């Protein structure tokens, strides 16, 4: 027992300084080795934000954060960044602009990540939050052109006439109507009904439904109409040709009016002219005559001249 005690006493009493220096150098070399065997990797990850269903983000200063991971070479070689996520969970909503701390979702790598030193830059995100509301917004039809002369657009209907919009309150407060895509009604003479999509595209607002049924009702401007039979005069026909149905050349002229005085018109002065200068061969032709000697106000009347059929034959020579 005495020899053991003497050995311990000799260990601490003899060459104590050299022994302490050796221990300190060993510790220094150990920590230097560990430092030299450590590495770090830096990369960017997107930030996933989880909100209540009735809350919207109006603005966000950053969408990614720089992640720096420091650890041993061996551990970093085996590390897979795909299992690391950056998140912000907002459960207690406060309207306005505030900074929110980014958290590291490392549940899948919980054991391994404890071996690393992890830092985020930046570690917070500035968010502007606002409640989501719903609002009924009317639909505005967009029509191009006008119905044909003599017809008017009497009524326009949309079914439904409004949509339910859902989005941030401040955004919906600026939207008073939603337009349809343009519908061309140029020269139509009949009412039309068709589905039309809504010309609306906003990243933060959704609308239901996204189309409406458009009904455009067209009515005639002229309440009264009368048909007249007018003889047709053919001019400038080739001398070697003749009109086979010359006795049947009676044209039909329809006059439409806003007022009922068509019976007072003197159609005996009217003339229907067919210019046949361009006809060089025999055959059957469908042509529209020109009406002359008709003095009517274009605002009060609508004139419709029907096509007529003529048959052209060769002129016989009896000499």
Image (cartoon, helix red, strand yellow):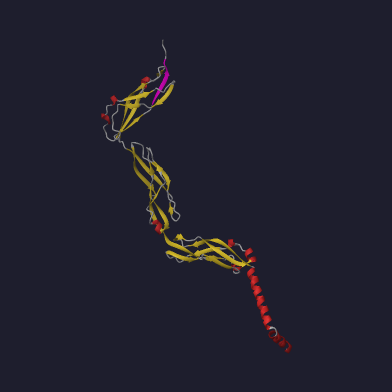
The answer to whether 125 is drawn above or below residue 178 in the figure is below
Please state, as top left, top right, bottom left or bottom right, where the N terminus lies in the image.
Answer: bottom right
* Picture quadrant where residue 183 is located: top left
* Picture quadrant where residue 318 is located: top left
Q: Position of residue 93 (x, y in %)?
A: 44, 65
Question: Magenta: predominant secondary structure element?
Answer: strand
Q: Nearer the viewer, residue 158 or 127?
A: 127
The answer to whether 177 is drawn above or below residue 59 in the figure is above
Q: Residue furthest top?
A: 319
Please state, as top left, top right, bottom left or bottom right, where the C terminus lies in the image.
Answer: top left
Q: Position of residue 75 (x, y in %)?
A: 63, 66
Q: Position of residue 12 (x, y in %)?
A: 68, 85
Q: Is residue 120 left or right of residue 308?
A: right
Q: Residue furthest bottom?
A: 2
Q: Residue at x 40, y 57 (%)?
A: 171
Residue 155 colored magenta?
no
Q: Residue at x 46, y 63 (%)?
A: 126
* Picture quadrant where residue 220 is located: top left
In magenta, the rendered stretch is: 308-315
């Amino acid at each position: 027992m005495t020899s053991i005690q003497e050995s311990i006493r000799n260990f601490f009493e003899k060459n104590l300084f050299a022994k302490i220096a050796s221990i300190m150098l060993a510790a220094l070399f150990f920590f230097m080795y560990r430092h030299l065997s450590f590495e770090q990797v830096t990369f960017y990850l997107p930030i996933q934000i989880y909100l209540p269903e009735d809350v919207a983000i109006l603005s966000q200063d950053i969408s990614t954060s720089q992640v720096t991971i420091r650890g041993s070479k061996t551990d970093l070689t085996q590390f897979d960044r795909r299992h690391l996520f950056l998140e912000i969970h907002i459960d207690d909503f406060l309207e306005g602009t505030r900074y929110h701390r980014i958290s590291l979702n490392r549940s899948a790598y919980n054991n391994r990540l404890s071996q690393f030193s992890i830092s985020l830059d930046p570690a917070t995100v500035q968010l502007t939050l606002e409640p989501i509301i719903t609002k009924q917004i009317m639909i505005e039809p967009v029509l191009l052109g006008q119905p044909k002369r003599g017809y008017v657009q009497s009524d326009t209907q949309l079914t439904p006439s409004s949509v339910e919009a859902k989005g941030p309150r401040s955004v919906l407060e600026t939207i008073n109507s939603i337009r349809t895509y343009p519908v061309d009604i140029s020269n139509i003479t009949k009412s039309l009904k068709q589905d039309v999509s809504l010309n609306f595209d906003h990243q933060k607002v959704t609308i239901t439904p996204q189309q409406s049924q458009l009904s455009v009702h067209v009515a005639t401007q002229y309440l009264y109409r009368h048909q007249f039979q007018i003889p047709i005069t053919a001019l400038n026909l080739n001398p070697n040709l003749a009109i086979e149905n010359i006795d049947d050349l009676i044209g039909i002229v329809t006059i439409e009016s806003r007022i009922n005085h068509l019976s007072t018109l003197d159609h005996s002065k009217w003339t229907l002219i067919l210019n046949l200068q361009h006809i060089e061969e025999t055959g059957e032709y469908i042509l529209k005559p020109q009406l002359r000697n008709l003095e009517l106000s274009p605002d009060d009347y609508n004139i419709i001249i029907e096509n007529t059929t003529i048959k052209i034959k060769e002129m016989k020579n009896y000499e």
